[in-house]
Amino acid sequence: MTILEQTVAAIRPADPVALAEARAHQDRLTKPRGALGALEEVAVRLAGAAAVSPPPLPAPAALAIFAADHGVHAQGVTPWPQEVTLQMVGNFLAGGAVANAFAAQVGASVTVVDVGVAADLAPAPGLTISKIAYGTADLSIGPAMTAEQAVAALETGIAVARELVDRGARCLITGDMGIANTTASAALICAFTGKDAAGVTGRGTGVDDETLARKVEIVRRALRVNGLASAPGSGSGTPGSGGVSGGRTGTPGPDGVREGDPGASALETLAAVGGLEHAAIAGFILGGAALKVPVILDGVIAGSAALVAAALAPHAVDHCVAGHRSAEPGHAAALDHLGLRPLVDLELRLGEGTGGLLAHPLVCAAVRVMHEVATFDSAGVTDKEA
């Protein structure tokens, strides 16, 4: 079995016993039932994912920022030059980005992973060089990646998740950097949800109306030329499934995915219109899920990558928490399809993992309640009459 197959096979659904125990425990705590709203569901969700109630405290956290460039940049979908990807990697490593400031605030480590920056990077502390290609091909002309490249990027994300957990991380946070990557995100969201490009393509780094219109047309063109006018399994999937089964059947193919496997459709979609960082983030999600370590998703890049992960392994979503809702319209569509409720809605559209980092204290607080708040019986507090 390949690393990808082994990881997918290791992912288990939320444990029903732990879910029931967590809900019952919430109801015994010294507070009105449901008084903590969405935080109660977060704690229950993490209990189901860990298969134990109360769940482990999701700290310390580790942020992984996956960086890559995109061939579609040549189509004028953003006014930012491509070299900004490389420059921002340097900024992350120097500790000067917003993600660094937020990570320091919550005590999270920061690891930058080069999976496809269109330049060579010198080794540096905090940098993992796993370059698969110098950026993707132009998705509006043909496939952005080969199947082999997509699998390599997925397995890079898995390896990073394993390494960070081995180093002590008990919560993983997704981060990204790649000029033009919201174009690829919109294409992935269209392909997996069946939404029209006009409804899920946003302004990214702040493009004007003319550039936005061009960006929408580029996304539509990418779907047409890659034969993705309709979503894989669109209309037949359930939230969290991406519409594609995670079952493994058939015989192994040369790209690491078994021929005849419904998951191959997801891989083909990823290779056609995704980015190397999208693939790596999808693998990062799968890696965390296989290890029963919660993954806090950031914005639209992470949301589109989570659609890929869910298509490859539907139960991976049981191990995810939506950190925030991005201002990018496609993010809401992705979260709705995945059945995830965002914890923070501050109209962020930065990426880097910033929204996930802001949500981490909320996730920790939700779990700490399960460990530290007294029950009605233990505190001698009278519960309301049934």
Image: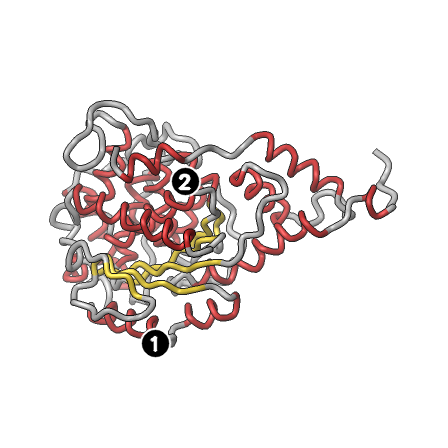
User: Is 355 rendered above or below residue 256?
Assistant: below
- Does residue 259 appear in this view? yes
Q: Nearer the viewer, residue 345 or 18?
A: 18
Q: Quadrant of residue 95?
A: bottom left
Q: What residue does disc 1 label?
A: 94
Residue 259 in the image: state x and y as whole percent. 19, 27
Residue 317 in the image: state x and y as whole percent. 44, 40
The answer to whether 140 appears left or right of 41 in the picture is left
Instruction: Decide which of tag 2 and tag 1 comes sooner along the chain.
Output: 1
For numbered disc 1, what is the local secondary structure? Answer: helix
- Residue type at mark 1 is Ala
Distance of mark 2 from mark 1, alpha carbons?
32 Å
Numbered label attached to residue 189: none
- Residue type at mark 2 is Ala
User: Is 190 rendered above or below residue 246?
Assistant: below
Q: Quadrant of the C terminus?
A: top right
Q: What residue does disc 2 label?
A: 290
User: Is 229 rendered above or below residue 90?
Assistant: above
For numbered disc 2, what is the local secondary structure? Answer: helix
User: Which residue is drawn at the image coordinates 37% and 51% (left, top)?
Assistant: 161
Residue 294 in the image: state x and y as whole percent. 48, 47
User: Which residue is drawn at the image coordinates 58% and 38% (left, top)?
Assistant: 52
Q: Quadrant of the N terminus?
A: top left
Label 1: few (<14), some (14–19) or many (≥20) C-alpha neighbours in 10 Å: few
The answer to whether 198 appears left or right of 52 in the picture is left
